Image (tube, helix red, strand yellow):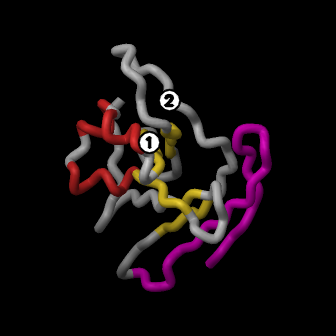
Amino acid sequence: MVTTGMKLIRGRRMPIATSRALDASKAILMVVARLETVKPGRVPGADGELQAPHVHVVIFARGLLRHLHTRVYFEGDPANNDDAILALVPAARRSTLLARSVNEKPGTWHIDIRLQGEHETVFFDV
């Protein structure tokens, strides 16, 4: 079953598609959302140190008792090496927070945010 609709994201309407896996044993709910934004610059954190460019993402959906907070960093950005929050994430899990550049579309980035299972995205307790 696939449904599509329009949601308001930062003042700009974007199509959203939702798909449920046909194999009930996998019980997968996949939400595809498209967000257009400008790649942010570095901003100071609570300690005054500059953070790597990132987008803060909050997910709230039916079935979730609490909002899920994560960050999307940009793969290959040299500032990632100095980011205090990213450094708290075990090295083996950092890739779940990195958007990858889409080669055929310069300036376009892609990331899969997974709520559970293999390669589950890192979520922060805030």
Q: Is residue 125 visible?
A: no
Residue nearest the observer in this picture, 86 or 24:
86
Residue nearest the observer in this picture, 52 or 46:
52
Q: List x then y, in percent, for residue 20.
A: 53, 74
Q: List x then y, in percent, for residue 122.
A: 33, 49
Whichever of labels 1 and 2 marks the residue nearer the N terminus, that label is: 2
Q: Is residue 50 left or right of residue 62?
A: left
At mark 1, the secondary structure is strand
Residue visible at 57% across and 57% down in the picture = 109
At mark 2, the secondary structure is loop
Position above or below: 75 against 54: below
Residue nearest the observer in this picture, 107 or 93:
107
Position above or below: 52 against 73: above
Q: Which mark is residue 71?
A: 1
Q: Quadrant of residue 71?
A: top left
Is residue 14 shown in magenta? yes
Neighbour tally class for label 1: few under 14, some 14-19, many 20 plus, Cα within 10 Å: many
Q: Quadrant of residue 70?
A: top left
Is residue 89 shown in magenta? no
Q: Quadrant of the N terminus?
A: bottom right
Residue nearest the observer in this picture, 104 or 30:
104
Tag 1–tag 2 contact (CB < 8 Å) = no
Residue visible at 22% across and 56% down in the picture = 92
| Magenta span | 1-24
User: In the rendered structure, which amino acid carries the disc numbered 2?
Assistant: Arg
User: In the rendered structure, which amino acid carries the disc numbered 1?
Assistant: Arg
Position above or below: 103 against 46: below
Q: How far apart are the alpha carbons under marks 1 and 2?
A: 14 Å
Specify the principal SS of the magenta part.
strand
- Residue of label 2: 42
